[in-house]
Image (spheres, rainbow, N blue to C red):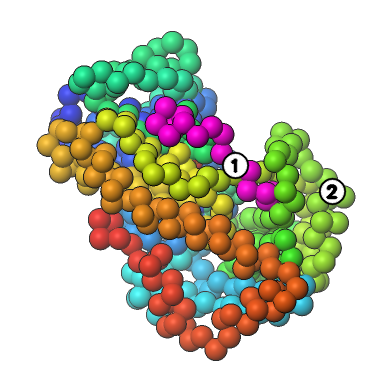
């Protein structure tokens, strides 16, 4: 393990989510010191379930925390999409031997805290990573030879460079892109955690099923060694704000999904309350970088969650940024330009592809019948071919 840093002052990383921690680890593994500035009092993750596709697992492997992450994750045997109204199966992608061979890793579902926790432990073991909580970055100043970040409590941090990994409401982004608050996507999600003992045995599948209906979709899957099920019911309401602080009773959420067939509704009737969350996103940005300051993860390319790749993109960003810094010979502005040049098309494609799934998942009328027919007759290999651009880890990850 490298103990003497290659950089004079640390990189400052605003935000200690999956992206920020992965960035700190990626830099440390190349010999660069960083300080992670997290606004919360503790490092942690909001929400429960996270799908971790093979491209994301490749990054965790490359960061040396893949085994730790996989130990707590559940490696799924298939992914299923079903019509929420008729109950018919639309898509069934096997994720067994052939899938793993094709993409070099399985497909996992996990508790978010376990993936974040694997990265956090990895950072804690790295002498080159300093972790600070209660450290909200409010501003920064670029100097000729570096960046000074200012925290909410008035402290300042002198750094060689600054990475804004501060999520969908990124403060750093406002200086670089200046595009205000992220846009409401028109959709919101009702989330819940269902203890396994409350889940009827016949509904306990070893894989996620996505129930797609007019303007809605529901997904649930087991996490934490089958102790709990992650449940999410998304609905397109057009709302531009929702109350994210109080719980929603079943009497609010259930009627919105009553067009559904028996199985998704049986699952949805179990929770006593739901958390509401407004889905926000942005259009792809032309630029994420200004001098020795750049953006990463949701700060750079927040997306709707429809193809479950936001965290995967943050992880890929991190490893790419580490590789570019490694090759930069101390010119971090160049490294960040190079990082952006490598990442922007892929991350933006994922952002755009996620949004396009709105038309597929939430189709109504004849469009729904078209959707149900789209995957008919496809072999597993044909499914894999179509997913290859997404699930094959880019060169710089492998
Ligand atoms: C409902 C839903 C389901 C999803 N499912 C999946 C999935 O299955 N698979 C997947 O890959 N992705 C999924 N995503 C996307 C994924 O959650 C995000 O893309 C990912 O968490 C982004 O990581 P990040 O580190 O960039 O940002 P965040 O996770 O938002 O982390 C940002 C961190 O920065 C901190 N912070 C914010 N502002 C400041 C500041 N000014 N100073 C210091 N700290 C600050 C925050 O407290 C936070 O800890 C889903 C998203 C949603 C909404």
Q: Quadrant of residue 333?
A: top left
Q: Is residue 237 above or below residue 388?
A: above
Question: Would you say the residues marked 1 and 2 are in contact, meaning their CB atoms lie under 8 Å apart?
Answer: no
Q: Quadrant of residue 4?
A: top left
Q: CA distance from mark 1 to mark 2?
A: 24 Å
Q: Residue furthest top?
A: 154
Q: Is residue 335 left or right of residue 165?
A: left
From the image, state whether disc 1 or disc 2 is nearer to you.
1
All told, the count of numbered labels is: 2
Magenta residues (range):
173-191
Residue found 52% across the figure and 25% down from its top = 41
User: Which quarter of the image is occupied by the N terminus?
Assistant: top left
Q: Which mark, by number, is residue 183?
A: 1
Residue found 77% across the figure and 52% down from its top = 271
Q: Is residue 244 above or below residue 343?
A: above
Residue, disc 2: 252
Residue found 18% across the figure and 29% down from its top = 7
Residue found 37% across the figure and 56% down from its top = 346
């Amino acid at each position: 393990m490298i103990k003497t840093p290659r950089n004079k002052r640390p990189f400052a990383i605003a935000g200690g989510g999956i992206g920020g921690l992965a960035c700190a680890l990626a830099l440390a593994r190349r010999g660069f010191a960083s300080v992670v500035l997290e606004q919360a009092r503790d490092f942690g993750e909001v929400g429960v379930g996270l799908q971790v596709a093979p491209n994301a697992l490749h990054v965790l492997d490359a960061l040396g925390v893949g085994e730790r992450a996989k130990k707590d994750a559940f490696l799924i045997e298939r992914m299923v999409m079903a019509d929420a109204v008729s109950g018919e199966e639309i898509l069934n992608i096997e994720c067994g031997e052939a899938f793993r061979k094709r993409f070099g890793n399985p497909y996992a579902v996990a508790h978010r805290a376990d993936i974040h926790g694997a990265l956090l432990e990895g950072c804690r073991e790295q002498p080159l990573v300093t972790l600070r909580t209660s450290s909200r970055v409010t501003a920064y100043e670029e100097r000729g030879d570096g960046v000074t970040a200012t925290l909410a409590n008035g402290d300042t941090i002198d750094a060689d460079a600054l990475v804004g990994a501060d999520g969908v409401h990124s403060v750093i982004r406002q200086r670089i892109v200046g595009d205000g608050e992220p846009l409401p996507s028109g959709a919101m999600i009702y989330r819940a955690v269902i203890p396994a003992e409350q889940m009827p045995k016949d509904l306990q599948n070893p894989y996620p099923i996505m129930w797609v209906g007019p303007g809605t979709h529901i997904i649930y899957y087991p996490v934490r060694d089958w102790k709990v099920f992650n449940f999410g019911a998304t609905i397109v309401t057009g709302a531009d704000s929702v109350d994210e602080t109080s719980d929603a009773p079943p009497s609010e959420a259930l009627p919105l999904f009553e067009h559904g067939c028996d199985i998704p509704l049986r699952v949805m009737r179990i929770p006593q309350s739901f958390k509401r969350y407004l889905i926000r996103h942005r259009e792809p940005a032309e630029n994420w970088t200004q001098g020795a300051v750049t953006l990463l993860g949701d700060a750079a390319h927040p997306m709707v969650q429809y193809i479950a790749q936001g965290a995967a993109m943050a992880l890929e960003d991190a490893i790419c940024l580490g590789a570019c810094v490694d090759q930069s010979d101390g010119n971090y502005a160049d490294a960040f330009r190079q990082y952006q040049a490598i990442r922007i098309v892929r991350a933006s494609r994922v952002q755009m592809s996620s949004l396009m799934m709105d038309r597929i998942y939430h189709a109504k009328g004849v469009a729904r019948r078209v959707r149900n027919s789209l995957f008919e007759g496809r072999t597993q290999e044909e499914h894999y071919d179509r997913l290859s651009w997404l699930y094959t880890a880019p060169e710089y990850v492998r």
